[in-house]
Amino acid sequence: MQPASKGPIGVFDSGYGGLSILRELRRVLPQYDYVFLGDNARAPYGSRSFDVVYQFTRQTVERLFEMGCPLVLLACNTASAKALRTIQQNDLPQWDASRRVLGIIRPTVEEVGDLTSTRHIGIFGTKGTVSSGSYPIEIAKFFPDVKVTGHACPMWVPLVENGEFDSEGADYFVKKDINALLEEDPLIDMVILGCTHYPLLEAKIRHFMPKHVKVVSQGAIVANSLADYLERHVDMRAKLTTGGSCQFLTTENPDMFRTAASSFLAEEIVAQHVDL
Ligand code: DGL
């Protein structure tokens, strides 16, 4: 791989969820160019094995690097939990050590300590994210007094990917998973939406969540954290192009992606198909 010259920020997710992060990135850092890649053809990743998530994520990161991105953000908790470390430690030095791949779990975790009074928090995530233990492990490094209970919501991503996030079916599964989490730990006063698809269900989650429980989604946290990272890393900042553009790529049908993504982002977008 050629050393990185100037290019856009790559943003990756298994599907539409990463758009909830992209929207905030473009709000907080509108000057940069972005390439969003959704691996919709192979979504969801959430119940896939460690090795499959790693291989899929590795392919998409490599593709975004080949397209000239000096920096790729994994806007996906499952990929951040299961693939980030191996890519950073094994693949990146072989590809081009001057590029960077960042995840979204660490920046989220750094913010949570001040948001809970009971010191009991809940994490909603995919099976992969919850079973990886990444959130409790990272939270223990910053806030060892906080008790973390993870709960996997395997139906939430398929509801979002299939445009069913405002349906009665979504009501059923959102209520069921909230009740299960709060039964497991009734002292929870804050819940992290630890999957980038979940903000698309956020209105429903807030509706069914008891009012004393804070619901925290990641978009603004991740965007502010990237702004802070770029403030501190002048070398990386200098490698990013600043035309304010955004290109959308999907491994699925681009018309399907365009229709769904335009409604999620509340703006008309154009999408292209990409093979990995
Ligand atoms: N949006 C992803 C996440 O944040 C994963 C969804 C999936 O593909 O299961 O975990």
Image (spheres, helix red, strand yellow):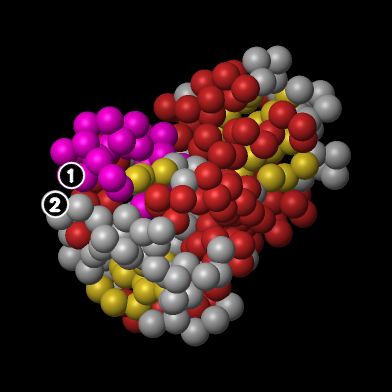
| Observer-nearest of 157 and 21 | 21
Residue 68, visible in the rendered structure: yes
Is 241 rendered above or below residue 98? below
Q: Secondary structure at mark 1?
A: helix
Query: Where is residue 229 drawn, in percent x and y?
Result: 52, 46
Residue drawn at x 35%, y 37% is: 84
The three-letter amino acid code for the residue at tag 2 is Met
Residue drawn at x 74%, y 52% is: 206
Residue drawn at x 32%, y 55% is: 70
Quadrant in the picture for the C terminus: bottom left
Q: Is residue 180 left or right of residue 269?
A: right
| Observer-nearest of 51 and 33 | 33
- Crowd class of label 1 (few under 14; some 14 to 19; many from 20; radius 10 Å): some
Is 9 rendered above or below residue 178? below
**Which residue is most to the top?**
145
**Mark seen at residue 1:** 2
Is 124 rendered above or below residue 17? above
**Mark seen at residue 95:** 1
- The magenta region covers 71-99
**Mark seen at residue 233:** none
What's the distance in space between the residues labelled 1 and 2, CA to CA? 6 Å
- Crowd class of label 2 (few under 14; some 14 to 19; many from 20; radius 10 Å): few
Query: Where is residue 31 drawn, in percent x and y?
Result: 52, 70
The three-letter amino acid code for the residue at tag 1 is Trp
Inspect the magenta stretch and tell me whether residue 84 lies in it.
yes
Query: Where is residue 221 drawn, in percent x and y?
Result: 63, 48
Q: In which image quadrant can residue 107 be found?
A: top right
Q: Secondary structure at mark 2?
A: loop
* Magenta portion: prevailing SS class: helix
Residue 164, visible in the rendered structure: no
* Marks 1 & 2, CB-CB < 8 Å contact: yes
